[in-house]
Amino acid sequence: MRAQDSATTSPAVAARPATAPAPAAPRASGTVPAALGVLSFSFSFPATAWALTGFGPWTAAGLRGLLAGVLAALCLAAARVPPPARRHWPGLLVVSAGCVLGFPLLTTLALRTSSTAHSAVVIGLLPLATAAFAAVRARRDGRRPSRLFWGAALTGAVAVLGFTLVQSHGRPGLADLYLFAALLVCAAGYAEGGRISRELPGWQVIGWAVVAALPVTALATALALPAEPLPPGGPGAKAVAGLLYTAAVSQFGGFVVWYRGMALIGVPRASQLQLAQPLITLGWSVLLLGEELPAAAPVTAVVVLLCIALTQRART
């Protein structure tokens, strides 16, 4: 009788510790790649500023997508990855339009007249926009962020927006309009990419997105190069290094780990890690570009980091 009781109760007892801690593993393993994606993206604006020292804005944006598309095509061919299912293509085209075409071009145009530090802080509203797009998409599945999540996300966004208005003396310029448009199209691409990454590996999501954009990026490059001739002595090492970084990391490699993290911890929670991205970019701009650190940056940093902590603890 004792052996029978042991046999009947042991599966239930054994199941408790096996199932209770299960959610912690995906969250921990997903936070790391998402954070690596944020770190990769944090250098995109300084790298773009470097690229603009030797390339015109349309040329830099076109070459960025063209080189990333060639790299992705080689990786997909080497791995013998079959084309995605038909149901995935609408979402992939949203990623392509937002993250491969719209965001790089609009931010490059903005960086012609706006500092890297200022542009990075404006894009700090991207996490809130991404969470909003993801929430709209997730409503049909019955998944929605909690009030604590939205409260922390809104607080972080208000802190970033206030910082932006102080820096621009309350008068957003043309560069700010470019940046606000960029964050909207990018947020849509992030949300769609994170959703598709639950079914396809993240590197394939961004890989097919940049490959789908190849006709546009190739045509843009072909038209831009004659209209924006290179300097007489060539673009220079710094410009080439910046262009290669934006193509290999900002446009492809960073998305591989970013979408992997989104698939594991969810789009809303992963997106809020990006609240730290403007602050990291501020550090790059001071260290590498010699820009002046705004006095309000440390206060904004503390508020944003607290908001990140709250969003990561909030339940969906």
Image (spheres, grey):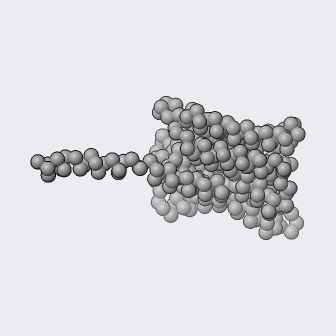
Residue placed farthest to the front in the image?
2
Q: Nearer the viewer, residue 265 or 98?
A: 265
Q: Is residue 103 in view from this perspective?
A: no
Residue placed farthest to the left in the image?
1
Q: What x and y, as percent, mark residue 62?
A: 72, 53
Q: What x and y, as percent, mark residue 314?
A: 55, 40
- In the image, residue 99 above or below residue 33: above
Q: Nearer the viewer, residue 200 or 273?
A: 273
Identity of the residue drawn at 81% across and 65% down: 235
Q: In this view, does 152 lie to the left or right of 316?
A: right
Total marks placed: 0
Identity of the residue drawn at 47% across and 33% down: 141
Q: What x and y, as percent, mark residue 90?
A: 55, 39
Q: Is residue 88 in view from this perspective?
A: yes
Q: What x and y, as percent, mark residue 302?
A: 72, 48
Q: Nearer the viewer, residue 41 or 101?
A: 41
Identity of the residue drawn at 74% across and 41% down: 159
Query: Which image quadrant for residue 161?
Result: top right
Q: In this view, does 4 lie to the left or right of 186?
A: left
Identity of the residue drawn at 33% across and 47% down: 16
